[in-house]
Amino acid sequence: MISGATVDVTIRGAGIFGLATAWSCARRGARVRVVDPNGPGAGSSGGLVGALAPHVPERWNAKKAFQFDSLIMAETYWAEVAATGGTSPGYARSGRLQPIKDEAHLMLSTDRADEADELWQGKAVWAVVAAESYPNWAPVTPSGWLIHDTLTARMAPRRAAAALLAAIRAKGGEVTTEAPDEGRVIWATGWQGLIELSEELGKPVGNGVKGQSVLLQHAAPDMPQIFADAVHIIPHADGTVAIGSTSEREFDAPDTCDAQIDEVLTRARTICPAIAKAPVLERWAGVRPRAKSRAPMLGEHPTKPGQFIANGGFKIGFGMGPKVGEMMADLMLDGHDSIPEDFRVAASL
């Protein structure tokens, strides 16, 4: 605990962007304090799914390059977090399968494999494989072929938040529900923070998108995750499989489940017959922060001079978290600004 000592960095918000930034600062020797009235991982960062999946390797841009860099650094990043705090985040670079629907899709997927060879710099592979390569797990595929990429990884969101929390504390950091601002201040307050900022500015800069997911009891810890028909199917190391998620721009209750997740589960069971009878362990709902630009919102806070913001992780917050944390630590501790133009606050104003 920091108790009475000067704090170098105050992070408001204990979701993935807040915790990742706190860890990146703490591992460099900064004294950090994370403040969240609801506790760590209380929002969308406390969900079930944990898909760290790349964009399609084509039409390359700054957002895709940033995400690629973050996914590549993730294995070393999460290993260090686990070693420091003694808590596993449930990370594994397990890969992903996607069904190929017809001959045209097969040709396109083969072309993308060539693109991945160049864009992924030999660090990961996008390949076309026969469905029979994954007996008892392959998704239904009309063509008999699948896309298999080796860049996609998984982590368990709640375990990842707990692992970051343990690592931060091991470095002398503090996570609390209330404390004053000290030192450099960064706001990583999720979808509620985007709504509040929109009200402050008198114009929309972001909002919340609700997602519902479900956890099944089914052991397939060494299998790749599956993505088909807009559904993620993620086998975790603990003998569970996470299914997600809905994407709801309009909602009444941010944390309640309804028939929409049942429809997603039905689709998942159709896609992957291996989980057709797997029992449901838990249903979950939460709201993800989506900035107006659809990219993360990073940099100087637009209404709080001398302070910073890191928000808008939306569906790829955990995938981008490692690099976001490092980039924000660079900015706050060293004054080094390497934020891509599309990620700057101005892009959402």
Image: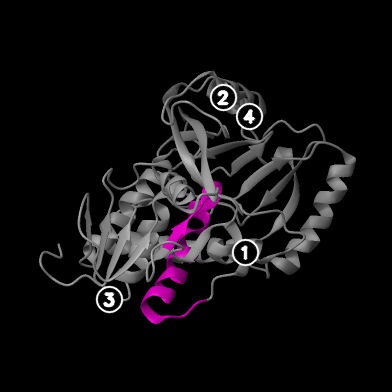
Secondary structure state at the residue bearing disc 4? loop
* Residue 28: x %, y % from top left: 32, 76
Under circle 2, the secondary element is: helix
Q: Nearer the viewer, residue 205 or 199?
A: 199
Q: Is residue 221 left or right of residue 84?
A: right
- Quarter of the figure with the C terminus: bottom right
Q: Is residue 222 left or right of residue 175?
A: right
SS of the residue under disc 3: loop
Q: Position of residue 102 (x, y in %)?
A: 86, 37
| Image height of 52 relative to 167, above or below | above
Residue 179 horizontal/vertical position (percent):
20, 56
Mark 4 / mark 2, whichever is N-terminal? 2
**Vertical position of residue 18 compared to residue 272: above or below:** below
Tell me which segment is drawn in magenta: 309-337
**Which residue has dot 1 on it?**
342
Q: Which mark is residue 265?
A: 2
What kind of residue is marked 1? Asp
Mark 3 and mark 4 lie on one chain; the one further toward the N terminus is 3
Between the C-alphas of marks 1 and 2, the distance is: 35 Å
